[in-house]
Image (cartoon, rainbow, N blue to C red):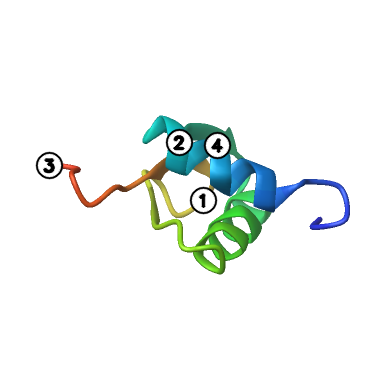
Amino acid sequence: MESKINFNFLAEKIKKNKKWSSYLDDKDLTMYAHALFNRGILTGENSCMGGSLIYISPETKF
């Protein structure tokens, strides 16, 4: 998947905008989460079987 998606660009965009979310199936959700984590982006998900992957910033309040 990393050959198809420019995760470096996506990570920089997320850091700049300080927000991001995407609805993904279970397999893609896991791959995105790991690829972004490796680039310093922490994410959370709303379901363990696919769903929204959401950027969690240090300023995020729950």
Q: Nearer the viewer, mark 3 or mark 1?
A: 3
Instruction: Say which element carries label 1.
Output: loop
Query: How far separated are the C-alphas under marks 1 and 2?
Result: 29 Å
Query: How far separated are the C-alphas under marks 4 and 3?
Result: 21 Å
Q: Amino acid at mark 4?
A: Lys
Looking at the image, tell me whether mark 1 or mark 4 is earlier in sequence order.
4
Identify the residue position indicated by label 3 in the image: 61
Residue 58 is left or right of residue 62, and the answer is right
Taking the view exactly as shown, the residue that stands out farthest to the right is 3
Identify the residue position indicated by label 1 in the image: 49
Looking at the image, tell me whether mark 3 or mark 2 is earlier in sequence order.
2
Instruction: Say which element carries label 2.
Output: helix
Residue located at (11% from left, 43% from top) = 62
Give coordinates of residue 61: x percent, y percent. 12, 41
Identify the residue position indicated by label 4 in the image: 13
Query: How far separated are the C-alphas under marks 1 and 4?
Result: 26 Å
Instruction: Say which element carries label 3.
Output: loop
Residue 41 is left or right of residue 8, and the answer is left
Q: Amino acid at mark 3?
A: Lys
